[in-house]
Image: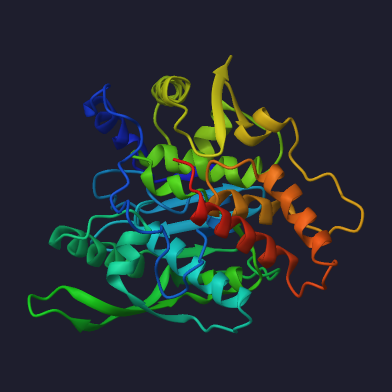
Amino acid sequence: MTIESSPSLFDIAPSLAMEGEDRTPLLPVRHPNQDLFICDVLDAIPKDDMASMEHPVFSLSTKPDTRMRRYEHNGNIIEIIPSGKGLATIHDKDILIYCISQLVAKMNHGEQPGRTLRLQAYDMLVATNRQTSGAGYRLLADALTRLRGTTVRTNIQTGGIEETRIFGLIEEARITRKTFDGRMLDLEITLSDWVYRSVISKNVLTLHRDYFRLRKPFERRMYELARKHCGMKDEWKIGLELLQKKCGSNSPLRVFRSLVKKVCAHDTSHAHFPDYAITMADDIILFRNRLSLKTKADVIVPVRDAPYIDPETMHDAKTVAPGYDIYALHDEWVSWWHDMGKPELKSPAGAFIGFCKKRHERSPIR
């Protein structure tokens, strides 16, 4: 991967230094009395497209990032061109994740959704753990502007098709209803065909709900990479220099090393990093699946006469039933299925997710 005309994305370094060491690495749950995804589709689970998880499309800078960037890696080329408002940031990506999650949930309900979504702004803010104050709405409007203004030129495949495309991350955003003081209530977002194609092809992965609570843009990017490459496996290793490239940084290696060490130290102290425990030794970063650390297994052992549940569904279940031993819940679900006479299930994955969700609603683990 090569980087040209790139600002140091590690303008984040000063912001990390400014953060008080006594603060927890996770943001507070801003809406504790509401489910994460109370929105148009009630059981939407956070989903992200794999193309942008693999490649550094979004800026990690905490300051306006206004220089064009170019990346090349294994035949994939990405050029990211900002608007006058700067590049779309990884926090702006929350909007795309919300939209992708909605589309996948609709598809899981048998619908064939189009590229345009009609959404309530409040639901989007709640779902992504953002503030619902006036400032929260203004930041949402700014994020939509950056998403629309950022131009991407790439040959990365989505939906199995490779072609050079030039597009915005969203095609259009339209506020359809406002309050008397100008806050947006309802809006329409039209995704780019590139993003939409990725979703329709189900080139998406589930995110842990605590992704939206990570304070640092750098940690969000690290989590994306771990989720994409480690997934449900026991562990994944990556060298420091390759991690730096995948994060899109041209800062000095010693600065980047210091940042990674700080993240690892915080995770050792707080165990805050979603899904994976992070350690570093000799410039090798190791991500270990937290569930595997407890269960010593990363896939379900097939049970005779039991419906098949794939690893991605297991991750979804972990999201809707936080704190539970998902493998124990799976055993209970299989027993229930046998007790019911082994009924034919139209969607075993959906049935298992519903079982886990109801269990969590009855007895949430805090």
* Residue at 59% from the left image edge and 48% from the top image edge: 318
Q: Which residue lies furthest to the left in this view?
A: 181
Residue 6 in the figure: left or right of residue 352: left
The count of marks equals 0
* Residue at 79% from the left image edge and 45% from the top image edge: 300
The percent position of residue 31, horizontal first and vertical second, equals 30, 54
Residue 255 sits in quarter: top left
Which quadrant is the C terminus positioned in?
top left
Residue 346 in the figure: left or right of residue 110: right
Q: Is residue 307 visible?
A: no
The percent position of residue 21, horizontal first and vertical second, equals 27, 22
Tell me: residue 66, above or below residue 280.
below
Tell me: residue 162, above or below residue 241.
below
- Colour mapping used in the image: rainbow
Q: Residue furthest right?
A: 304
Residue 338 in the figure: left or right of residue 25: right
Residue 125 sits in quarter: bottom left
* Residue at 40% from the left image edge and 70% from the top image edge: 39
The percent position of residue 355, horizontal first and vertical second, equals 63, 60
* Residue at 52% from the left image edge and 84% from the top image edge: 114
Which quadrant is the N terminus positioned in?
top right
The percent position of residue 212, horizontal first and vertical second, equals 39, 49
